[in-house]
Image: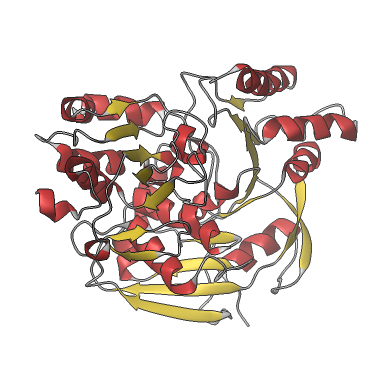
Amino acid sequence: MGMTMAEKILARHAGREEVAPGDLVLARVDLVLGNDITAPVAIREFYRIGVEDVFDRERIALVPDHFVPNKDIQSAEQAKIMRDFARKFNILHYFEVGRMGVEHALLPEAGLTLPGELIIGADSHTCTYGALGAFATGVGSTDMAAAMATGEAWFKVPATIKFIYRGKLPPWVGGKDLILHTIGDIGVDGGLYKALEFTGEAIEELDMDGRFTMSNMAIEAGAKAGLIAPDATTRDYLKGRASRPYREAFSDEDACYEKVIEYDVSNLEPQVAFPHLPENARPVREAGDVILDQVIIGSCTNGRIEDMRAAARVLEGKKVHKGLRLIIIPATQAIYRQAIDEGLVHTFLDAGAAVSTPTCGPCLGGYMGILARGEKALATTNRNFVGRMGHPESEVYLSGPAVAAASAVTGRITHPEEVL
């Protein structure tokens, strides 16, 4: 019996010929990452282990992005713990303010996450790198500490669910809509501790930015990882970017899947997830009359250049609704610069948006867009749990960037075609 991508990568890194779902393996990792919330806890645990050095100063990435630039004294202290640790152990991939970005956009951009690799991060959306054909998954801070010391981590091999997306994507429909539709179908626990494998002609049509969005939100279905097989699009993205050699992995034709789920997306509409779960997805034309107070375009889910371009196409020559705040946050400095060079930032400013340096900020209710009691926001972020973006009596709706931009113009959840 053949193996899936996920099984092949875990077997290779565990030094085994084969593995099967349910096996426990100790595997070497290619990259360990943490941010300004999770890394300080890991660093304290690392010191308790008592080792004299990290396993590899080039295989650890530290990205302060959640409350950075520092919003208060506590966040400044958190960032300083990371900074001091990076200096002490000469961590090569420490990203300071001005050079950092939202971690799950920054690390692929820097060529630090590659096909066939095994990557762990003390952040649940580490699964983003599955878009490149890596087995990437979130872990706790203590696991991060142990991996920084040993270069290894324990894994239970997950079963794989295969998703096949058939048909050509309609206008304004992208990776965010595919994954919201999928989670709406299987539920937030439909992939619990599974590897999700995304395939089909609609996936082949997606650019890397759309693929990153899909893998990023695998965790919103409870999944351990979300993988897309490498192809010409992947290799073009990595050309001149990959920081080290890599070895791709592909599922065998006779691989055993727990189940196979197929969708015809030829007539799929842009999706909106209603509070308070990503599974509450419905077509935007069925959203009804939801009046908004705020729109956020950004995050590790939809803060990349194609997201900026989609938003600008909708906002060109228009104004943000007078009763609404529009906040746009490019996910990295390079994306920010490109958005400036392409004139996208001018479009945003002319429309009346606020544009920020890269930060996770409002996505987790950190800063740069906290909601008050009773307020409603539409966001291109990945979660809309109770209190996620501020007051527990606020509401967060999720969409792709085009719907978000159109809604910022009308003041209510809107299909892009309505404003174009």
Which residue is painted at 31% across and 39% down in the image? 293
* Image coordinates for residue 211, horizontal then vertical, percent: 39, 55
Q: Nearer the viewer, residue 2 or 305?
A: 305
Image spot of residue 241 (x, y percent): 43, 37
Q: Is residue 300 visible?
A: yes
Name the residue located 19 percent from the left edge and 35 percent from the top edge.
320
From the image, which quarter does the N terminus lie in? bottom right
Say whether residue 223 is left or right of residue 360.
right
Q: Relative to 21, does residue 283 appear above or below in the rendering?
A: above
Say which residue appears at 57% left-offset and 68% top-offset.
189
In the picture as drawn, the residue positioned furthest to the right comes out as: 50
- Give 58 or 17, whichever is nearer the viewer: 58
- How was the colour assigned to the protein in this rendering? secondary structure
Residue at image position (46%, 51%) is 384
Position above or below: 331 against 29: above
Q: Decide: is 252 above or below 104.
A: below
Asked whether residue 304 is in view, the answer is no
Where 387 falls versus 348 (above or below)?
below
**Percent of width and height locating residue 105:** 45, 39
**Viewer-proximal residue, 369 or 201?**
369
Q: 160 or 346: which is nearer to us?
A: 346
> Which quarter of the figure has residue 337?
top left
> Which corner quadrant of the image does residue 324 belong to?
top left
Looking at the image, residue 36 sits to the left or right of residue 389; the answer is: right
Q: How many numbered marks does the figure carry?
A: 0
Residue 203 in the image: x percent, y percent?
35, 64
